[in-house]
Amino acid sequence: DIVLLDIMLPRISGLDVLRRMRAARIRTQTILLTARDSMKDIVDGLDAGADDYITKPFALDVLLARVRAAARRVPEKSMPVIQYMDLSLNPKTLEMQRGGRVETLTRTEYALLETLVQRAEHVVQRNVLIDEGWGQNSDVSFDSLYVFIRSLRKKITHAGEKQLLHTIRGVGYCLKGKP
């Protein structure tokens, strides 16, 4: 629900982690914890996307109070259902609906299908899907993507329904009503 993130991590800066989270559209409330207490450091942390900034040393009671306050600030999201032809995606429940049935999707399946729906009728390259499903700079293989696409294809199309998810050999995938 809330991310507590130290700025001084061993291999990567906590600010870089935060920037990547925000670039990946991860909007989870984030509180930075750090020994850096200059005005510039605080401004940099908040400008990078932090919701709060706590300098060390701090009292545990203060940290817990700030966590509670951040949790109260999380707005109730009214996310619209995403639609393509007779297929709809509910971002709140991570469910796909088609043909009167509802299929629960994993977070990764949802991210992949959402990307395909948003770019319906266009070919989506495999590396774009990997970035959307697992995040940029992930080392997920095309074989892993194929496994998820195969699972999605089974959930999207049942017997007697029009195939919507098409493979574009050597390039990627496309969501379209006509082959």
Image: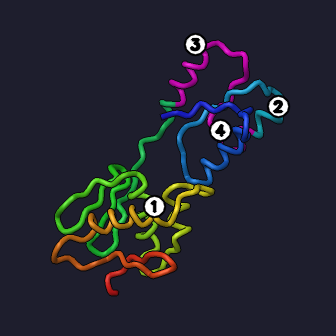
The residue under label 3 is: 61
Residue at mark 4: 50
**Element class at badge 1:** helix
Mark 1 or mark 2, whichever is nearer to me: 1
Q: Is residue 16 magenta?
A: no
Numbered label tally: 4
Give the class, few, some or many, for how many residues have Cα within 10 Å of label 3's Cα (few <14, many ≥20): few
- Mark 1: which amino acid? Ser
Image x and y of residue 120, in percent:
42, 76
* Magenta-highlighted residues: 45-70
Q: Nearer the viewer, mark 1 or mark 3?
A: 1
Question: Dot 2, how many residues are within 10 Å of its Cα: few (below 14), some (14-19), or many (20+)?
Answer: few
Residue highlighted by disc 2: 39
Between the C-alphas of marks 3 and 2, the distance is 24 Å
Q: Identify the image quadrant of the C terminus.
A: bottom left
How much space separates mark 1 and mark 2, taking CA atoms?
A: 45 Å
Q: Position of residue 24 (x, y in %)?
A: 57, 54
Earlier along the polypeptide chain: callout 2 or callout 4?
Answer: 2
Sequence-first disc among 4 and 3? 4
Residue type at mark 4: give it: Ala
List the residue tagged with mark 1.
144
Residue drawn where x is 34% and y is 72% of the image? 84
C-alpha separation, residue under disc 4 versus residue under disc 3: 20 Å
Q: Which amino acid does label 3 sit on?
A: Asp
